[in-house]
Amino acid sequence: METVRAGAPPRPLLTEDQIRIRVRELAEEIGRDQGDLEELVCLGILKGSVFFLVDLVRELRVPVAVDFFQTSSYGSSTSPGEVLIKKDVDLSLRGRDVLLVEDIVDTGHTLNTILSILRLRRPRSLKLCTLLDKPSRREAEVPIDYVGFTIEDRFVVGYGLDHDERWRNLPYVGIVEV
Ligand code: IMP
Ligand code: MG
């Protein structure tokens, strides 16, 4: 396997066009499921999902409220489900329809914990939309309602995803060797 040098651009996995088309499809699907009900609270998990969320909500034709949630792990592999809330949701979620927007589901521990925290806020519905899914890495079961792309076990960056904070602004999703 060829190793990409530190400065070399990540090898493209998903092009800008593929992403744009898929985001539009996801928005149509979400809009259909939502019907002409009330507002949808689109809740982005910081920081990776911001780029995806912004593009997704602009394609949604249902009334939307936007909010963000951020956690960090304690960095312990012995308690993978234990997370610290770094930025809590500003809005009340009680009785509302919530769409959690994530960049990637990997082992599933982060999302699993976030979902259990958010369920305590008693939303009317809580759905999960992720741009990318790496099912081969799953350790904790996560109910995903909308998946942009299912990918193999590779470390990817771009379109919000980073490697040590680098490459988030790459307009496509590419593979880095780590
Ligand atoms: P997990 O599902 O709890 O294992 O963790 C998911 C988080 O790990 C994501 O929200 C990302 O921040 C990060 N992550 C997992 N895989 C990748 C990747 O391939 N590229 C960049 N970040 C990743
Ligand atoms: Mg993330």
Image (cartoon, rainbow, N blue to C red):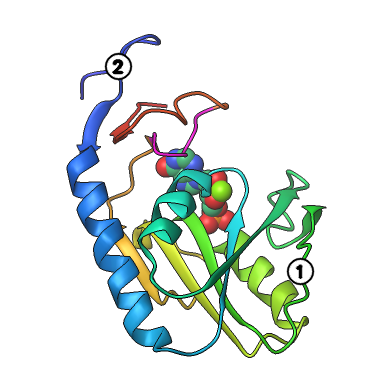
Say which element carries label 1.
loop
Asked if one can make out residue 106 in the rendered structure from this viewpoint, the answer is no
> Quick check: marks 2 and 1 in contact, CB under 8 Å?
no
Res 135 quadrant in image: bottom left
Count of labels shown? 2
Camera-side residue of 170 and 72: 170
Residue in the image at 81% along x and 54% along y: 84
Q: In which quarter of the image is the N terminus?
A: top left
The residue type indicated by label 1 comes to Leu
Q: Where is residue 110 in the image (x, y as percent from the top left)?
A: 62, 59
Query: Is 62 on the left or on the right of 171, as rendered?
Result: right
User: Is disc 2 surrounded by few (<14), some (14 to 19) or many (20+) residues within 10 Å?
Assistant: some
The residue type indicated by label 2 comes to Val
Residue in the image at 68% along x and 68% along y: 113
Mark closer to the chain start, 2 or 1: 2
For residue 161: magenta? yes
- Which portion, as a residue range, is magenta? 157-163
Q: Position of residue 57 (x, y in %)?
A: 45, 60
Residue in the image at 33% along x and 48% along y: 153
User: Is disc 1 surrounded by few (<14), some (14 to 19) or many (20+) residues within 10 Å?
Assistant: few
Q: Mark 2 points at which residue?
A: 4
Query: Is 106 on the left or on the right of 90, as rendered?
Result: left
For residue 43: magenta? no
Q: Name the residue under label 1.
A: 91
Query: Distance of mark 2 from mark 1, alpha carbons?
Result: 43 Å
Query: Is 164 on the left or on the right of 161, as rendered?
Result: right
Q: Where is residue 94 in the image (x, y as percent from the top left)?
A: 75, 85
